[in-house]
Image (tube, rainbow, N blue to C red):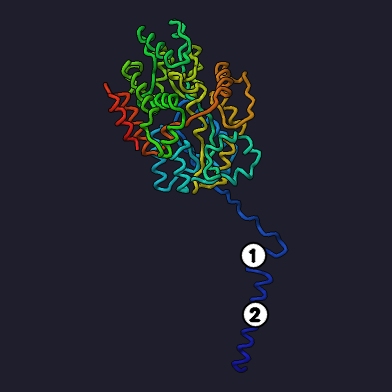
Amino acid sequence: MNRTHKLNMLIAAVLLVTLLFTIYGRRDAPNVSQSPPAAPSVSSAPVKITFWNVETNDLRQALLNQSIQAFNQTHKAVQIVPYFYEVETYKAKLKLSMISGKMPDLFYYWTGESFKYMVDSQIIADLTEKMQEKPAFMKQFYPEALQYATYYDRLYGLPHTTSHVVFWYNKRIFAQYGITPPQTWDELMSAAQQLLNNGIPPFTVSGKERWPLLNWFAYLSNRMGGSTPFQHAIKKTGDFTDPAFLEGAQLFRGLITAKMFVPGFLGLDGPKAEDILLKGEAAMYLQGDWVAEKMLSNPDIGYFRFPTVHGKGDPQVYYGGYSSGWAISANSNRDAAFEVLSSMFSMEERKKVVEASGLLSTVKVMPLDRNNMNPLVYDFVTFIEKDPVDFFGYYDQEIDPHRSQLLLNAVVTMASAPTMSQEEIEDLLKQIR
């Protein structure tokens, strides 16, 4: 047998083996007449959505925690991992996250220049297409609310509440001294002086947090000059030396020199300032309606608008508006994060928040059940949802972060200085650049 013949036989053998292997498979393979075994089930881990919020330590936070827990129990593929931070800590952490590029998936925001910066830096996810895919969901919102998170005709966030800064007052103290809710600044100052003469501090405020002091300066300057001066300040076509700001600062300084605030107010945090009003240790408290449930759980507490000032301003123009909500970061799992948002903004969830807290929602056509609510909270909601004719936004959020800190520091300086001349006030406001 020659070498060629041997080689041909070897090739034929190899081909036969290959053919048999193809037909019958490996030794450990199942018979072709049998069904292959089922593949082992692999349970994929759920998508975790980090959710950053400001810490409130009140019913708002409790309600949100309940909603998160309910979501996690009913959604196995997506799980929310919540984090709550004190306001100033939150702002600092969010700033660091922006710099590092390690943003939370879903986060609390305030509208204004800081939010616009995140939009311009492409840190925030564009929600326009997501909302357009769910037209019924989108129609739930007041269009003007969505405008507050719209930039360049694109939607970047969902405002969740409408806020209003109002005066909360102790009705028992007012009745004791024959005081009725004032409608003008002069009436307010007259009532405050009467209380002071009788040993009752007129106003409590959490000066430690700074921005509650800004409530006063913002209202006073807006009443004196309307919204135009501040709009110029935002755009840097004007500054804080406009006459409206100077007049507002002078009126604010008048409260300080007359000792209208409770002793030690610069060291008070929010809960302590609130408790002073609730205990009857001060008569009035200028604060947003996020405290409505806490205030109105006490039958002695009522509310009234910030008044006109020397005949100027409209008392139905409120400090607040659609200023806060939730947004998704650009580097998150957008489908999963939007699923969380959709759940949090369901009619059922928003209704629960309004009925429990008194905070108005940005979701419209929401029939409230008075039987599910504190009657005083229901009456407040009924009043406040119809009363405003306009809003002006929070000064410290509307301007850029650098000037925001300068403004907050300036207000604290005005609140703490023993004396300040008109020239010193003007020089202080000039520094907000």
Q: CA distance from mark 1 to mark 2?
A: 20 Å
Q: Is residue 352 above or below residue 337?
A: above
The amino acid pointed to by label 2 is Leu
Q: Which mark is residue 29?
A: 1
Residue 14 lies left or right of residue 426; in this view the side is right
Element class at badge 2 = helix
Camera-side mark, 1 or 2 = 2
Q: Which residue is mark 2?
A: 15
Where does residue 6 sit, x and y in percent of width and height? 61, 89
Q: Secondary structure at mark 1?
A: loop
In the image, what residue occupies the spot 49% across and 17% down?
A: 304
User: How would you rate the neighbour count of disc 2 (Cα within 10 Å): few for under 14, some for 14-19, many for 20 or more?
Assistant: few
Tell which of 428 and 84 is nearer to you: 428
Please state if 251 lies on the left or on the right of 227 as rendered. Answer: left
Q: Does the residue at mark 1 contact the one at mark 2 (Cβ under 8 Å)?
A: no
Residue 256 place in picture, x, y as percent: 33, 19
- Label 1 crowd (10 A; few <14 / some 14-19 / many >=20): few
**In the image, residue 31 above or below residue 105:** below
Q: From where the camera sits, is residue 46 visible?
A: no
Quadrant of the rendered image containing residue 342: top right
Residue 133: horizontal and vertical position, in percent? 63, 45
Compare marks 1 and 2 and give the one earlier in the sequence: 2
The N terminus sits in image quarter: bottom right
Q: Is residue 39 above or below residue 52?
A: below
The residue at the point 39 percent across, 38 percent down is 401
- Of the residues shown, which amino acid type is indicated by label 1? Ala
Using the image as rendered, state which of residue 91 and residue 25 is in the foreground: 91
Above or below for 410 versus 42: above
